[in-house]
Image: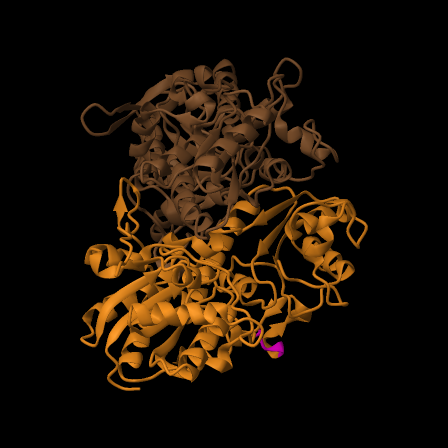
Chain colours: A brown, B orange
Amino acid sequence: MKNLKGACMFGQSGGPTSVINSSAAGVFIEALKQENITAVYGAAHGIRGILEEKFYDISKEDMKELELLKYTPSSALGSVRYKLKDIKVDDTDYKRLLEVFKKYDIRYFFYNGGNDSMDTCNKISKFMKSSGWDCNVIGVPKTIDNDLYGTDHCPGYGSAAKYISTTLMEINLDAKVYDTGLVAVVEIMGRNAGWLTAAAALAGVKGLGADLIYLPETPFEMDKFLSDVKNVCAKNNNKCIACVSEGIKNPEGKYVGEFSASSTDLFGHAQLGGIASILASAVNEELGIKTRAIEFSLMQRCGAHLASKTDVDEAFMAGSSAVKFACEGETDKLVIFKCDRTNGYKCEFVLMPLELAANTEKKIPAEWITNNGTGLSQEFIDYALPLIQGDAKAPLEDGLPRFAKLKKVFAKI
Amino acid sequence: MKNLKGACMFGQSGGPTSVINSSAAGVFIEALKQENITAVYGAAHGIRGILEEKFYDISKEDMKELELLKYTPSSALGSVRYKLKDIKVDDTDYKRLLEVFKKYDIRYFFYNGGNDSMDTCNKISKFMKSSGWDCNVIGVPKTIDNDLYGTDHCPGYGSAAKYISTTLMEINLDAKVYDTGLVAVVEIMGRNAGWLTAAAALAGVKGLGADLIYLPETPFEMDKFLSDVKNVCAKNNNKCIACVSEGIKNPEGKYVGEFSASSTDLFGHAQLGGIASILASAVNEELGIKTRAIEFSLMQRCGAHLASKTDVDEAFMAGSSAVKFACEGETDKLVIFKCDRTNGYKCEFVLMPLELAANTEKKIPAEWITNNGTGLSQEFIDYALPLIQGDAKAPLEDGLPRFAKLKKVFAKI
């Protein structure tokens, strides 16, 4: 579908990251340049904004603020978790989308998100095609979880990995400052794939990493965990730093965190709270060593002050490439990253059919998990280290980040 | 006591901060320059290192690494929480200290810490004097809590305040990203003084602060808290960010956090965990809104990647001033900050008698607490904003901070 002329719509979906707005900047700045794009819209809260006809006219924004989006965390347009129904069961939403697309002459649609969002993007693409509405649809990848199939890595992951590894180095220095014992248990995001938690291993490159790392890819056994901690403590003056994915599962495949909702967990420890506090309490009860439970919580995904320049730049390029590809006539695809690390690090932006991305999860290769399930191999370090290079953050104003301020003028026809 | 000639000893004490090593750099670099200082020692784990004759010969360190100490969080020499006994009850430690001071000809003693550490420093100073051992003793202030009496502010506070305000801005953007309700409860350090939690108000300068701030200075009532949250949610699409000091106390003066150790707290909510999770659970139960409990944990005190340049520079100057003052013959004093904000911000380093600093806590003035106990006045902003200015962090190596690496060669005689 070459030479389409009309408006473009961009939406942000799923959990925020430090660089999802950098992709938005890439889409907007490139789209505003393209001759065949007659209007640039940003959907308020993703797909819901389109359904409700709530989207912003991006031509009304100052270029300076669009540039600052590169360094502004979270989703500036608002995000959403909205699952389109199976079209055979209920096609109401699809028809409404088509109505809005026609009303605003939307000929380019860009959607930024992870697995679920690419499923949405794929469904919309297929429906527009089957309805005969010419519209080039390109997905822009995003997820701190780094679990999107087909791409070398995902925008958002590098910055989260940089937050995790840098902060862990600082915690390592802090937790080991006294001459008394301390076991710190650090809980890191990632329900099914351990990429984020694995980033703790990057801090090890500087000698300030975790002693033990537990990923969702490896079944978690409390007895082994306690014995691992005991061994580290014995060698290390009762000091140990364990990083644990929120998604660790017991050998039966149940999330360890699920037990925390009841007053007693499966291991017999009375608990309420996150996995870090479950495990820290277990260590304290069983080994009698002082513990501290730490959660990186929202900070790991929105800590844009610690963003990776590589990640910020790639996220921007993912957005601008999506627009360029669409304007060249590509559709029904996702922008993915093809990387070469043989002679320095190079990243190329290419396309993959959308349906391949939808709802597939990429996990850490088993051969990268070492040390009886508590460590990561050099292959992982070589893979991840290039992704956290460089600093890129918002300029300071009053000693605080100057984030983008959008006017958010609703588009009207 | 002018013109003393001999060795100097420096120790770090109490909880680590982002800039306690910057003061160490100030002491070491200045002491190595002074003609009257014949050797520069750094005590391993504070006072305990002196008692056990474990201290490092700083002349063996590379100047480049001493410079990097400025940007290295935590206490590079190791810290300690060790309380000297009342000399009338047990003078063993004091005699041992004198023995070590004589053996190594220690004529200059610098101790870096907060209230308790200055008490230790004061006791040592008085004992050396009464024993006839000429030794100039100068305290170097440190505490993220900012509760040291007599000084405008404390090294460590500015960087912690910058971490708290910057991170809160990011969390604010993240927590408000969906079009559904969310109450985020953020727990911030400070057992008795609310300076750290108050720093959340700085984020408000950029429009991304907390809706509600609860300090230990104001008695905490659960009913009022829930009603405050309800009011904010009603006005704000069920979104609310509340920052709470770990040291909030009920009207009877008991820590709210103390209740968390039992299975049911005083408010009737079954709980285990920090204050953020107690309050988040209460909101969820009472108001039925989704909540998220966030703890800034160790990150707020060791997040040197987000240090304030003003703080780093002042911490360094506090250390180097201590050495200069001692070499000019001053003793039995603490370096304090005298600041002028009338025409821009100026900070002067002056001295105060050590006994005034020992064990006194400075709290937030009542008139700076506004909005029925949930906000801070412009006076607080004017006070704190100059302290978070500028960035100063370790250079990057492999995309990660290059912290100081000391050789730590034990001194021997």
Instruction: Count up the numbered dots.
Output: 0
**Where residue B375 sits in the image (x, y, percent)?**
61, 67
Q: Kindly identify the residue that appears in the image at 29 percent across and 75 percent down.
A: B323
Indicate yes or no whether the magenta region holds residue B127.
no
Tell me what residue is drawn at x 39 percent, y 18 percent: A150
Residue A329 seen in render: no
Q: Is residue B400 left or right of residue B282?
A: left
Query: On the rendered image, what quadrant is the N terminus of chain B found in?
Result: bottom left
Closer to the camera, B326 or B238?
A: B326
Residue A295 is situated, as x and y percent measured from the top left of the image, at 54, 42
Q: Position of residue B101 (x, y in %)?
A: 34, 70
Residue B30 drawn above or below residue A5 = below
Q: Main secondary structure of the magenta part?
A: loop
Is residue A381 or residue A108 the one in the foreground? A381
Q: Whole-percent x and y of residue B337?
A: 40, 78
Above or below residue A227? Residue A1 is: above
Question: Which segment is the magenta one?
Answer: B362-366
Residue located 63% across and 39% down the image: A281
Q: Nearer the viewer, residue B85 or B66?
A: B85
- Using the image as rendered, state which of residue A5 and residue A395 is in the foreground: A395
Q: Quadrant of the C terminus of chain B?
A: bottom left
Q: Is residue A324 above or below residue B233?
A: above
